[in-house]
Amino acid sequence: MAHDKNDESFRVIDRRLFTESGELRPEAQEQAQKEKEAPKAGAGKTVAGSAAGSAAPVPAGKAPEPAAAPPAEKPAPLRSPYFDLLVRSLANQAAMLLTGIQDPATGQTMVDIEGAREVIDMLDALREKTRGNLAPEEDQMLADMLGSLKFSYLEMSKAATTAAAEQVAGRKAASRR
């Protein structure tokens, strides 16, 4: 079986945008220009008018492409009682860590500022990951809780820093005597 070297059934098309020297290929420039002009030309037509009024021939064996439908608006997310429960549970945990929890072994009230910071960070991550998927009421509730918890955290951190500084100053004064 002999193959003809001039067989044109297989051809390679270079679709790279840039030449070897790094310049934009003329074909790429023409395509970019066509893409810029295409939305401007079709902006005034309606979907029905553009499909019915087009006189461009359709190649044999190919079906005409359907007109692109305008994107449907995303419905507003519904409020979930489980999301409210999750957020309130985490917020209560952070608040308890900031205001103090009684240690069952010693009976002393202990404040865990670092633990509260971790829970607040979790709520921040939850807000970031759910952005755009929450009902407006849920987003507002989460923002309010985070704002309140962050303010409380800041106040408790300042108080703890001041108390620690006073303790260190008291120890230094006692050791000088």
Image (cartoon, rainbow, N blue to C red):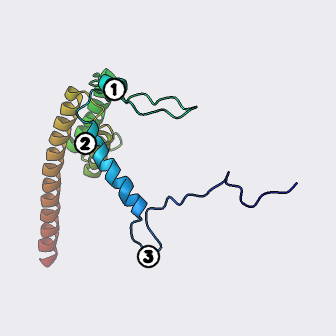
Classify 109 as above or below 168: above
Classify 50 as above or below 19: above
Tell me residue 120's x, y (percent).
26, 44
According to the picture, the residue beneath numbered tag 1 turns out to be 53
Q: Which mark is residue 40?
A: 2
Between the residue at mark 3 and the residue at mark 2, the CA separation in whole angstroms equals: 33 Å
Between the residue at mark 1 and the residue at mark 3, the CA separation in whole angstroms equals: 44 Å
Tell me which amino acid carries mark 1: Gly
> How crowded is the residue under tag 2: few (<14 C-alpha within 10 Å), some, or many (20+)?
few
Q: Earlier in the sequence, mark 1 or mark 3?
A: 3
Determine the secondary structure under disc 3.
loop
Q: Are marks 3 and 2 in contact (CB under 8 Å)?
A: no
Q: Earlier in the sequence, mark 1 or mark 2?
A: 2
Tell me which amino acid carries mark 2: Lys
Q: Which mark is residue 21?
A: 3
Tell me residue 23's x, y (percent).
39, 71
